[in-house]
Image (cartoon, coloured by chain):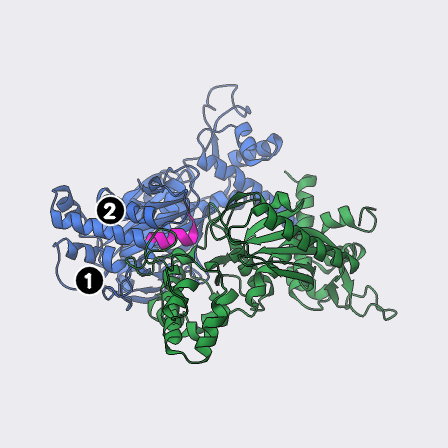
Chain colours: A blue, B green
Amino acid sequence: MGKGPGAQAELRRRNFALVTHALAAGEDLTRAAVAAQVGLTRATVSTLVDELLAGGLVEERGARRPGTVGRPGTPLALADTGPAGVGAEIGVDHLAACVVDLRGTVRCRAETPAANRGRKAPDVLAELAELTARVTAAAREEDLHPVGTTVAVPGLVGHDRGAVLRAPNLGWEDVPVAAALGAGTIVENEANLGALAELWLGGHRGLADFVHVSAEIGIGAALVVEGRLFRGARGFAGELGHVPVRPDGPLCSCGATGCLETYAGEKALLRAAGLATGDDTEPGTGAGTPALRAAADAGDPRALRALDEAGAALGIALSGAVNLLDPQAVVIGGLLADLTPWLLPGVRRELATRVTDRQWRPENVVTSALGRDGVLRGAACSAVRTVLDDPASWITRNGPDSGSRA
Amino acid sequence: MGKGPGAQAELRRRNFALVTHALAAGEDLTRAAVAAQVGLTRATVSTLVDELLAGGLVEERGARRPGTVGRPGTPLALADTGPAGVGAEIGVDHLAACVVDLRGTVRCRAETPAANRGRKAPDVLAELAELTARVTAAAREEDLHPVGTTVAVPGLVGHDRGAVLRAPNLGWEDVPVAAALGAGTIVENEANLGALAELWLGGHRGLADFVHVSAEIGIGAALVVEGRLFRGARGFAGELGHVPVRPDGPLCSCGATGCLETYAGEKALLRAAGLATGDDTEPGTGAGTPALRAAADAGDPRALRALDEAGAALGIALSGAVNLLDPQAVVIGGLLADLTPWLLPGVRRELATRVTDRQWRPENVVTSALGRDGVLRGAACSAVRTVLDDPASWITRNGPDSGSRA
């Protein structure tokens, strides 16, 4: 009946992942609490936990007190040594890298300013490789073992997540990023990683269906549905920045007119606030956000009006998204999170008028607490989560008995 | 390791469903072809097929020729007797019911005009119960055994799919539809069923991610993602009719301004074509579509202009949807399918300008071949598919050995 070794291994993998993800989401859970939460028997959970303990992926809290080791009531935690994930970020004006442990805690971090727009891809990647090598070496000092690297990029990523297909703000087309950074490297769009960071680290319990909006290069957005990134049929979902707000509006960098980006993108915002001149068909770099924030803080009327109007445009585009997708919430993250005191009134006003679901509430629009760091942390966590998803494979390959742990 | 009877039963159910769905999608497959397609061994598939044959859910083609019964090379088909699904439809101006067999073929059908707007719900439901009783009796004559009924309604359906929460065009609020029609009844939004019909019966092979747009009451739409209906967090996804097209546009029935419905809804269309006067804040009934089609067929310039402008509005709203969701295709179905010769140019023009994915092609917008019948057929198929999803349960309860088959 198809119940061969393959099916057994699949079941074992699934049960292992249930346990590790429960430990990742909750604090100091006992074996009994894990069993109740994931719906497996206590005996099954105990067997799995024993293997995780032996493999060094889980530790017992308070286990140093004699006589308490292995008791069912002992609180468990994911280990803060062992497998780790490397996150790397290619921004228009900076490079960054960090390492997180199994718990998602940042353990090492490095960042450097870099004028990457129009710079040769091999030079950018060589500098990034240096940064990741530096944080990786520091992590090894702390008995952490990086299992993979995820690189956040401001552009479209190929289906195999190895190459950047197109990153207009870097001037890149078809750049094989993963190959330049070594085995175990995955490339991912920065807006997607910001959304995943919110899902994993954002602290909104039970939030599994949301639209995450950020601004870094232009307006970035990503959709999380049932706790997973919604990529679309070709991997291009989440282009909120090019949802039409006023179809006869200004020309956008994409060639269309009246896209959200022409109203709420950084360049358009700065221009409307009187903080920049010239054309706004370039989507910006995020560098002007502090100046805008300062002007709004000082009560500058042009800045306040610009932000309110951008909030309304964002609210119009999000109304369409909410009516189509019916998410639990909209999360404003990344650099945009710094501007929410002035953006949210407009956003909420439009949503209140335009969302057809009568249960929609203004409180369903929330601000992310992760800020600009979300993307980099999301990248590192996405690398280490491969171990949480399949701990048995890691133990087999790297556990204490394999002799290959390095 | 959690591999108790529950896990075994789950695996068995999954394998059974793989086989029945393969037979539902392909024609005259042999056991070997099914095995190759679903990735199970031939021995496993043969065992499952034997049970399906014994249970009367599958038959062998050409099995009447002596010596061919049970040979691995014998083509198989789902049975055209045995389990069947009942579909029922509550329209503003009609009621309908039908029965489909396991293959999805309509075997009995009944329809009656009925002015349901503002009519008392118990009266409507009593008349619908009469219709479904009539088609059910006719189906039993053909050795079909209805396993459940799905009722298509023009409104919002509650989470347990038993009641209509709100159907403004019927004047209904909180009507317990399922309870009135007996055990095994499920209620579903008509736009969702139209999309499922397209998925199951539409004949676009490999199409599993699409936006389905129809018009019956207002603009109806539904999203299919990875071969499943995308319902959203509260079950309200797919409200394309209330995506803003021009935020300062006409007042809509929903209370907002400039929604797609105010440009491409039936009332707005008829008015723009000079075929109706008065306000267009009512979303229409579909009754005016033939007149509009006739005017366009006759080359009436007002009708042609109205349709082109409605197509453009539809294209603007769909551009937002495509940029957000990245579907494989947009399918125009229901009554709107009759108008595609005049709507499609505007739709495709806007999508060509506004979709950021460079691989998007005008041919990705297709017309459904199912027409207005899609909703009713989708309802009946959704009822019978519960058997395809879990044939073993049906065999246990109703198979030849159970003694309870009636």
Q: Is residue B372 above or below residue B402?
A: below
Circle 1 residue: A280
Q: Which mark is nearer the camera, 2 or 1?
A: 2
**Residue beneath label 2, please?**
A343
Chain of the residue on which disc 1 is drawn: A
Dot 1 crowding, Cα within 10 Å, few <14, some 14–19, many 20+: many
**Residues at discs 2 and 1 in contact (Cβ within 8 Å):** no
Lower position in the chain sequence, tag 2 or tag 1: 1
Q: Regarding mark 1 in the picture, which secondary structure is present there?
A: loop
Q: Is residue A321 magenta?
A: yes
The residue positioned 83% from the left and 48% from the top of the image is B401
- Which residues make up the magenta segment? A318-327
Asked if one can make out residue B42 in the rendered structure from this viewpoint, the answer is: yes
Q: Amino acid at mark 2?
A: Leu
The residue sitting at 45% across, 70% down in the picture is B364
Residue type at mark 1 is Asp
Q: To which quarter of the image does residue B265 belong?
A: bottom left
